[in-house]
Amino acid sequence: MYALLLAIIYVAFISLGLPDSLAGAGWPVMHGDLGVPVSFAGILTTVIAVGTIVSSLLSDRLTRRFGAAMVTTVSVALTATALLGFSNSSTFWALCLWAVPYGLGAGAVDAALNNYVALHYSSRHMNWLHSFWGVGASISPFIMSYALSGGGHWTGGYRIVGIIQVVLTVLLIVSLPVWRKVHPPLLEHHEDAPPMSKPLSLAATLRLPGAPQILIAFFAYCALESTLILWSATYLVVDRGVAPATAAAFASFYLLGITAGRFLSGFIADRIGDRGMIRYGGLLVALGVVLIVLPLPTNAVALAGLVIAGFGSAPVYPAIIHSTPTNFGRENSQSVIGIQMASAYLGVTLMPMLFGALSGWLGLWLLPAYVGALVLLMLVMSEVVNRIVDRRALVDATA
């Protein structure tokens, strides 16, 4: 039963990543068919981000009331419905309408499933599961490409992924008894369950020692990752004179570095620990940034720096999530992870746009400094949390 549930969760993480790259892959065609400017992609992603933030903040209350299995199942069903809605949309505003349930479903399942894994599985599985998310995110552009080939339509890409999500929803419904048997829900008061308590409000969660600092650290990490994904190729072309095709390939290598790095991190995460993975990952990202900015006559070092930054980024997200029950208590982890997800979506939504505005004013040369500042902020805030947790443990030990 344990192995079966773990396999289901791995499939769920692949499914989580599948829709994330569809809009980016299809938008060059979609905006023309819908008769809207290229820039309207930002409106669509903002609507989705607002939905994910709202459902992430509600995840603690929902999960305590219905359990992680049910929240995951309903959220995937919402996502499937939204994707099939996308596949039948012929106007931009219809897409925005379907983006609401898509965002709500994506945020809730992300928070619930990450907390479930953090509570019940090792750091090794957390890294491998997020690597499988990368597999899903890497597959979806190929699905969109297949849908567009031979004169096809972008709606076909959404329809394929929507059908996959429907199949996953059925699988999750069938597997509900397995979740209850392997890890009984909190309401049953089994011995491994976190003690029951009322859902924490946003204000109460923010008053937990170290909570504001970990939110800033998570915000900074997600901001640097999304900024590099969006802007690294443009930086290499405009500021370093790299050929566009080469820059695009290495920008994709950053994502591949994250996916491969999480797979490799799974083999060492339990030995090094979450703190070590965050520290070493952040230092690797910093090394990659230094290599990117070095004024050398060859661009090979800068391109290698981007790949190294991808490997460094790999373990940070899983380690921050996995350390949450330890840092803030199992009874508080769902609330904290829900707000962490919200802070992540804020970072992903706002910080690449802020860099775009700053680069338009100062120039694209700013990218390494911008990312470097985010790395430093992440590392400093993470270490502050560690000191707070260690100080609390010392007080508890001497009490």
Image (tube, grey):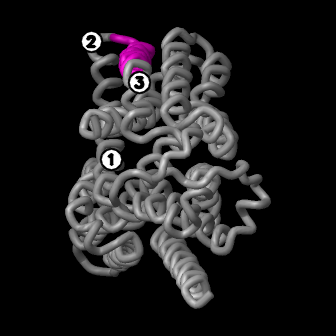
Under circle 3, the secondary element is: helix
Task: Report x, y in % for residue 4.
Answer: 26, 33
The answer to whether residue 140 is left or right of residue 180 is left
Q: Main secondary structure of the magenta part?
A: helix
Q: Nearer the viewer, mark 3 or mark 1?
A: 3
Which residue shows up at 38% across the image and 19% down it? 174
Q: Which one is earlier in the sequence, the residue at label 2 or at label 1?
A: 1
Under circle 2, the secondary element is: helix
How far is disc 3 from disc 1 in space, using C-alphas?
17 Å
Q: Are marks 2 and 3 in contact (CB under 8 Å)?
A: no
Q: Which one is earlier in the sequence, the residue at label 3 or at label 1?
A: 1
**Is residue 158 found inside the magenta-colored segment of the image?**
yes
Q: Tag 1: Cα neighbours inside 10 Å, few (<14), some, or many (≥20)? A: many
The answer to whether residue 376 is left or right of residue 160 is right
Task: Report x, y in % for residue 288.
Answer: 33, 73
Residue that numbered label 2 is attached to: 150
Task: Using the image, tell me which numbered label, if any, was put on residue 275.
Answer: none
Residue that numbered label 1 is attached to: 129
The stretch in magenta equals 152-171
